[in-house]
Amino acid sequence: MKFDIEKAAPREIYNLLIGLVAPRPIALVTSMNEAGLLNAAPFSAYNYLCTDPPIVGIGVTNRPDEAFVPKDTARNIRRTGEFVVNVVTEDLAQQMNICATDFPAEISEIEMAGLATTPSAVVKVPRIASAHAALECREHTTLEIGRSRIILGRVVSIYIEDQFIDPAGPYVRSEELHAIGRMNGLGNYVRTRDSFLTIPRVPYSEWKKRQQ
């Protein structure tokens, strides 16, 4: 089938894109409003974009309203300039799912999910204590595109539990971290436990030999 995107409804485009751009890492973002109330929300429109400087990007759609009303995460980051990306692993999956509930702004998803927080190293926003890894970020810029906001955050500090670090690199022991990814549709995820596939890179010199 072919789909004419110019004629497709936004929901149809959404359904197709999330089914094809997958699996996606999940950013469980903690943010804080001006009064100090914490918010936590998961986003799978998320990835790192460059490393020098280290920038991550998060796509946050507006609330489903006729007006252009930002979600709490986007509003908090725009007003305070800081946030933390907590890496979602298998043991955080259920709490992450609770944080996806559209609670009113005055209710803390962190409390509803039974999560504890701990101070970050650089930013004022705390990280989730049970998260095995987290990226502390400061807003680099926010782009408003249609009914969405693309938030670019500069990573200013990285926390990783010692057991998941190979000091030789340093490298992350991703095969032991057991992060989960988002797939198509609400509630569909994928595990990384026992699922790693290694395909060695082929140097050009070796590739030429194979062609002879």
Image: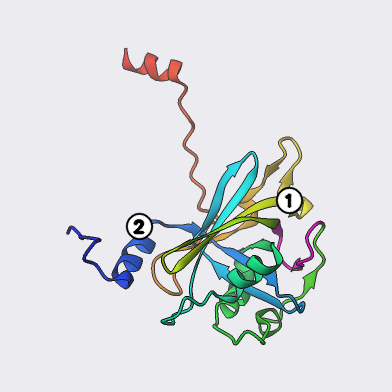
Q: Which residue is mark 2?
A: 20
Instruction: Provide residue 95's location: percent of width, then percent of height.
Output: 63, 76
Amino acid type, label 2: Leu
Q: Where in the figure is residue 212, as x and y percent of width and height?
A: 32, 12
Q: Residue at x 67, y 76 (%)?
A: 39
The kind of secondary structure element at disc 1 is strand
Quadrant in the picture for the N terminus: bottom left
Residue 174 against residue 109 in the figure, above or below: above
Q: Is residue 52 visible?
A: yes
Q: For marks 1 and 2, give the one nearer the viewer.
A: 1
Indicate whether residue 131 is drawn in magenta: yes
Can you tell which quarter of the image residue 82 is in? bottom right
Say which element carries label 2.
helix
Circle 1 residue: 156
Span highlighted in magenta in the image:
122-136
- The secondary structure that dominates the magenta segment is loop
